[in-house]
Amino acid sequence: MKRPLLSIVAPVYNEEKSAGEFYRRLRTVLDANRYEAEILFVNDGSSDGSLGLLLNLQKQDSSVKIIDFSRNFGHQIAVKAGIDHAQGEAVVVIDTDLQDPPEAIPDLVAKWREGYDGVYAVRTRRRGETLFKKWTAALYYRLINRISQSPMPLDAGDFRLLSRRIADVIKEIHEKRPYVRGLVSWVGFKQTGVLIERDERFAGKTKYPTRKMLALAWNGITHFSFLPLQLSTFVGILTSIVCFIWILHTLYVGLILKVAVPGWTSIMLALLFLGSIQLITLGILGSYLARNYDETRSRPLYIVRSREGFE
């Protein structure tokens, strides 16, 4: 069977209002550029009418393929599943909320044809996002780029093109909590970026509220950096020095000056200080231990309820 030029991997989670318009714009781009492509929608446990809409698209267009999860496993796992099933010479990952414009795909393909294995979209403008989200996103990208063992491009999300050989490497990685953009940077090969302007969501609410954004950020940091562990060690040493000085002070006041040491206040301050440091350190250690525990279990990364459009 001849391999298509492109595999478009598009995760879907409750995008009933935008998936149809996404397909229309994507199909227009593919047809205008005469790209032979397969469109892989990964339904990540949607509870609205997204699956029904996708099934109707598949009946109309044989290039549409659907991977339907048994439940919601999360965006990064949906991206990983799409890459696992992709057959194209290159794989384009793009969300269906239309914040990342399908019209930018030819720019990614052009760079790929120049010889780049990875082409990521760099966001020069983020319409429809609060100042807080823009500021925290910029801070996060710069922080993780500085502390990561595999530096990642600034202001680049999951909208990107992967060559066949990068996709094949990602396919062989079976981590339980994949952080795809980090894995792509870790793989290496020749990569570059193209500039895009990010639009507002076409419809509906964001699927990445603050809580999920923080969880994704922490996943990326603990996935590609040991700095939190190193910081916890540093904090432990610093706390020990402070406590040692406190002990010397207490002995001096009690044995040399013969002055009664205020008891309750000093003890409570010491307990609260040491307790907070210990809890923070244990929390950091727990995050890494939980990741190791998760990796040792033999559970599948995702469960597919059905596949449509595959031979």
Image (cartoon, grey):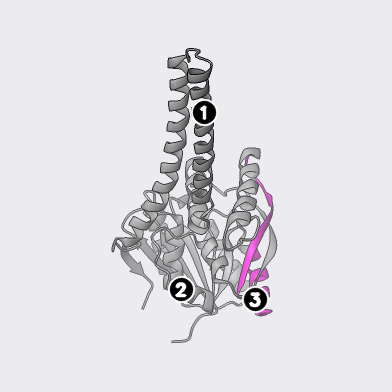
The amino acid marked with disc number 1 is Leu
- Identify residue for label 3: 116
Residue 2: say if magenta: no
Q: Residue 42 location in percent, x, y?
A: 42, 62
- Identify residue for label 2: 86
Rendered position, 301 above or below 234:
below
- Can residue 18 be seen? no
Q: Residue 7 location in percent, x, y?
A: 51, 73
Q: In the rendered image, which quarter contains the N terminus?
A: bottom left
Rendered position, 297 above or below 61:
above
- Identify residue for label 1: 248
Which range of residues does the magenta coloring cover? 104-130
- Can residue 215 be seen? yes
The amino acid marked with disc number 2 is Ala
Q: CA distance from mark 1 to mark 3?
A: 62 Å
Q: Quadrant of residue 120?
A: bottom right
The amino acid marked with disc number 3 is Tyr
Q: Quick one: SS at disc 3? A: loop
Q: Residue at x 42, y 48 (%)?
A: 285
Rendered position, 86 above or below 304:
below
Please state which of residues 285 and 106 is positioned toward the viewer in this rendering: 285
